[in-house]
Amino acid sequence: MPKIRVLVVDDSVVVRRLVTDVLGADPSCEVVGTAANGKIALAKIPQVNPDVITLDVEMPEMDGLETLAEIRKLYPRLPVIMFSTLTERGAAATLKALTLGATDYVTKPSGGSVAESLEQMRENLLVKVRVLGGQVVGPSKPAAPRALIAQPPRVSAPPHVDVLAIGCSTGGPNALTAILEMLAPPLAVPVVIVQHMPPVFTRLLADRLRAHTNLQVKEAQGGEALAPGDVWIAPGDYHMVVRRVGATRRTALAQTPHENSCRPAVDVLFRSVVECYGGHTLAVVLTGMGQDGLRGCQHVREAGGQIVVQDEATSVVWGMPGFIANAGLADAVLPLRDIAAEISRRIGGKRSSITEAAKAPRSSSCP
């Protein structure tokens, strides 16, 4: 099988060497060139014909955002992984890059020894290069491996919806923007979201979504009451769960172990939502790498809740939604443009059970 050809673009000699060493040591990858700035990179692309580009955000002469814009004009489907710092400025630039068409991003190692930096690179970069380099970012992506779960068809109509829970990863920020800007307020239910992102990034994502939609999107701090129309995003490096506190349901944060190599994890959120809302849950899983959300959706389905996932053609990576669709868990597999309408349809016409639930005795199944 041909190796994945990678062009490494970064103004730091140290970073170029780290990336080259990590990718060069993997038998599936080959670094076919390096560049210290965007101008050199654009000149090298037709010469080395890469399958994937790693692109630094901050560079002299031609920075990562300018370079990305040119790459998208000339090579609209070439996977580009942005390299960013774990800073406010780096996070803002990365979110901007994603809106300009970057496929994904990784954060640069911060501190530690060379050995620790290499290990961080292996964990964060190598898997993304393998996935993105083995596919075309577009409709011809291969299907995700079939999950070992089979589900019978529904025999009765699903119950009304009291909460919307969304999970996403690679490609998620743009998918979330597309969906939330089409959901007209006031929403009849609260919304809780896990997007795989590190600290700072999630707060800026919430700010960006609030600015581009008519919804009150905020990063959860823990303890917020879930009220209809509110949208809460899990903060980076914390699992977000829903707990019943007296007559209300509230967010809670925890730094318990990673699940599916993620924190926050979709599975953690979905399990807690089912514990508090049971079958009155609508789970939506959007584009993303890996299979986080699969087990959580199993809980949603077993409780009688509803599940909608993004289709293969419109996903940047059909991993998370693909596993759920292939497991037979999804009630609907839809292109991104149709998901907001489907959410509105499934939420619309719901009976107002929020007040009734608040009056009910505390359920022993809800933490």
Image: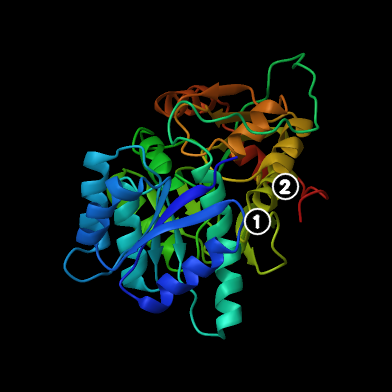
The tag earlier along the polypeptide, 1 or 2, is: 1
Q: How far from the left and from the top, in percent, is residue 317?
A: 52, 39
Q: Residue furthest right?
A: 364
**Quadrant where the image shows the N terminus:** top right
Dot 1: what SS?
A: strand
Q: Position of residue 118 (x, y in %)?
A: 57, 73
- Measured from the top left, where is residue 201 in percent x and y? 42, 63
Marks 1 and 2 sit apart, C-alpha to C-alpha, by 8 Å
Which one is in front, 99 or 119? Answer: 119
Query: Taking 149 as reference, is 177 left or right?
Result: left
Q: Residue at x 66, y 69 (%)?
A: 255
**Residue 271: numbered disc:** 2
Residue 223, visible in the rendered structure? no
* Side of 303 relative to 342 (left or right): right
- Kind of element beneath mark 2: helix
Is 116 drawn above or below residue 363 in the view shown?
A: below
Residue 129 vertical placement versus 254 (above, below): above
**Residue at x 50%, y 44% (from the top left corner):** 132
Q: Quadrant of residue 74?
A: top left
Amino acid on which disc 1 is placed? Val
Q: Residue at x 63, y 30 (%)?
A: 307
Identify the disc placed on residue 179.
none
Tell me the crowding category of disc 1: few under 14, some 14 to 19, or many 20 or more residues within 10 angstroms, Cα based: many
* Image point (73%, 31%), residue name: 301
Above-or-below relation of 270 to 305: below
Q: Nearer the viewer, residue 205 or 2?
A: 2
Circle 2: residue type: Arg
Which residue, given by chain and number where applicable, does mark 1 sit on?
A: 241
**In the foreground, 62 or 39:** 39
